[in-house]
Amino acid sequence: MKNYNPKNEPTDSIQRKSIKPVICYPVETLLPAKMDIYFNARKNLKKVNEFIIPAKDAICFKVPKGHFFRIFCESGPQVGDLNLWNADNLKEKFYSGKTRALHGTHLSTGDRLWSSFPYLRPIATITHDTLDWYGFDDDGGSVHDVIGTRCDPYTEKMLSGNEYHFCCHSNLIRALAHFQNISFEEAEIFVHDVLNVFMCTGFTKDTHQYFMKASPVRPGDYIEFFSEIDIIAGLSSCPGGDCSEKHSSDEANCYPLRIEVYSCIEKELENWVSPEVSTYNGKHKL
């Protein structure tokens, strides 16, 4: 937090502060997600796979392009940390920062999850969210954020002095290493900032610090995605449980999460095309 020092205030401070903000990335020119196609396709879904993510652990699973997957609250309020990769190229991964810049701090139905440079394309689209009723509360909190980075053992060590091995960062490393049959060291470079599924977060109004509060999720709630490309997804059941008190410890009540993967009737996707990677020429010069 920046400290306010009235001694440094210039005479035109009010004028400078009163300048109206400008949206950094106007999205009117973006090709919109074809939600009508997704909504029609999801009317006739067939479950083809199911996974359980154990409490305070993570797994990776594959979702073919043109399929849907849902993350369910299983048996108690629980948040999850989601990573996404191109199944054929782990270097192309979910880019939470650019997703946040395009769609805002919290995501819901119709928002898209974008991939990292130099690819920059939507790799998944949110097609249903049973928590879309929540909106923003009086504290400025909302659900499914792309603000937080994921709990990790490095920050935990720095702040508390403790070594805790079931942070979401470590969970995702183990899951990806196992799924790809690579070492922890190789896997760690691919683990990235997350979509905090079901987590309720915001910034405090006084110090503007990142906060969490008890998630409103309940058993049966889910968020649903459409896979725009072949993806590997990694999901960690956060050691913070519903994040009502703290994370990166064994103190919170934690629960499993459930994943369901669905196919749809092929003809429903006749007018859908998997997005291409960025057409920027990559020269970075005139």
Image (cartoon, rainbow, N blue to C red):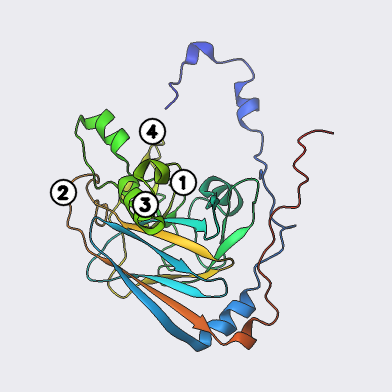
- Tags 3 and 1 touching, CB below 8 Å: no
Judging depth in this view, the residue of 172 and 68 nearest the camera is 172
Which amino acid type corresponds to the residue marked 4 in the rendered image?
A: Thr
Tell me where residue 134 sits by quadrant: bottom left
* Circle 2 crowding by C-alpha within 10 Å: few under 14, some 14–19, many from 20: some
Question: Which residue occupies 46% across, 79% down?
Answer: 262
Q: In this view, does 154 lie above or below 122?
A: above
Residue 200 spot, x, y in % from top left: 36, 55
Which amino acid type corresponds to the residue marked 3 in the rendered image?
A: Ala
Residue 28 spot, x, y in % from top left: 72, 58
**Of callouts 3 and 1, which one flags the residue occurring earlier in the amino acid sequence?**
3
Mark 1 or 2: in front is 1
Residue projecting furthest to the top: 7
User: Dot 3 lies on which element?
Assistant: helix
The dot on residue 250 is: 2
Which amino acid type corresponds to the residue marked 1 in the rendered image?
A: Phe
User: Dot 4 lies on which element?
Assistant: loop
Question: Which residue occupies 65% across, 51% down?
Answer: 119
Q: Distance between the residues labelled 2 and 3?
A: 23 Å
Q: Name the residue under label 1.
A: 190
Judging depth in this view, the residue of 160 and 177 nearest the camera is 177
